[in-house]
Structures are given as structure tokens and as C-alpha cells.
Image: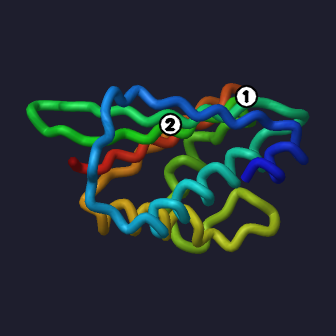
């Protein structure tokens, strides 16, 4: 993704809040596909350069430990209406988009017993949070 990011004057920063190596049961190629899709969308959502922050952390909520991957961009953001339709198959806010990428990503995460959440503010950017059980 570095070449595409560089072409769009976008910096991608990776951070990890993990203090140890953790082992989780995933299909590596599927999770890679999810991250590529989300980061590619983020690059395309940023006009005239910007930043994407990708972080990895171990989280525990109500004694339920999980790994959280967060992808946050400072792009154009999405409207409430766009957010409501975001994971709908064949819906795309892009002129040339097929509208399958994010719906497939959500299915992949759910097949790993995980969750995917998104929040966004116009002119401030979008944040995807992927939560995978430990």
C-alpha cells in the first residue's frame, strides 16, 4: 500500500500497543484482504495529502479479551446516510466502486467471530475498529 499512499501524498503510520506477542486464530490472507480494502478506501478518501493511523491493541471488556485494530484517516468523512448504508452490498459512495468491498470485509470479520465498527465526521475523517476475540 506504500506506493499507492505515496502517489496520493498520504502517510500511513503503524503503531502497536502490544507488550507481548499474542496468538489469535485467524485466516491471515482474509484479514490482510480486510486491511488492504479499508486502507485503500482511506487513501482514496483523502484529498491533497493526509494521514492514516493503523493501531493494534489488546483490549478487555467485561473479562472478554480481544485484539482491536483501528484504522483512522483524516479524509473527507462520511454523512450519516452514507454510514447507514456502508456495509450494504452494491452500495458505494465512490463513482467507480462496486460496493462489495466493505460488505465482504464485514462478513470476513464476523466469520472470525469478530465485530467491525465505523464512525465518521464530515471533513474530519473516518475510523474503522475491528475487534477479534483472543
Residue 23 is situated, as x and y percent measured from the top left of the image, at: 27, 50
Placement of 8 over or under 88, stated as above or below: above
The label shown at residue 119 is 2
Q: Residues within 10 Å of mark 2 (few under 14, many from 20)?
A: some
User: Quadrant location of residue 12?
Assistant: top right
Q: Identify the secondary structure beneath mark 2.
A: strand
User: Viewer-proximal residue, 68 or 107?
Assistant: 68
Residue 32 is situated, as x and y percent measured from the top left of the image, at: 52, 61
> Left or right: 10 with respect to 16?
right
**Which residue is labeled 1 in the image?**
123
For image coordinates 33% across by 51% down, the residue present is 115
User: Viewer-proximal residue, 47 or 64?
Assistant: 64
Q: Identify the secondary structure beneath mark 1.
A: loop
Quote the CA–CA distance across marks 1 and 2: 13 Å
- Can residue 68 be seen at all in this image of the molecule? yes
For image coordinates 73% across by 30% down, the residue present is 51
User: Viewer-proximal residue, 41 or 28?
Assistant: 28
Q: Residues within 10 Å of mark 1 (few under 14, many from 20)?
A: few
Residue 104 is situated, as x and y percent measured from the top left of the image, at: 49, 70
For image coordinates 80% across by 68% down, the residue present is 96
The residue at the far left in this view is 63
Amino acid at each position: 500500500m506504500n506506493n499507492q499512499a505515496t502517489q496520493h501524498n498520504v502517510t500511513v503510520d503503524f503503531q502497536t500497543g502490544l507488550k507481548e506477542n499474542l496468538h489469535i486464530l485467524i485466516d491471515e490472507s482474509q484479514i490482510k484482504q480486510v486491511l488492504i480494502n479499508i486502507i485503500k478506501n482511506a487513501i482514496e478518501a483523502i484529498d491533497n495529502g493526509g494521514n492514516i493511523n493503523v493501531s493494534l491493541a489488546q483490549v478487555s471488556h467485561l473479562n472478554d479479551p480481544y485484539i482491536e485494530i483501528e484504522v483512522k484517516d483524516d479524509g473527507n468523512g462520511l454523512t450519516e446516510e452514507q454510514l447507514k448504508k456502508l456495509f450494504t452490498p452494491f452500495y458505494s459512495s465512490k463513482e467507480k466502486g462496486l460496493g462489495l468491498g466493505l460488505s465482504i470485509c464485514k462478513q470476513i470479520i464476523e466469520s472470525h467471530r469478530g465485530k467491525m465498527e465505523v464512525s465518521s465526521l464530515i471533513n474530519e475523517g473516518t475510523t474503522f475498529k475491528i475487534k477479534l476475540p483472543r
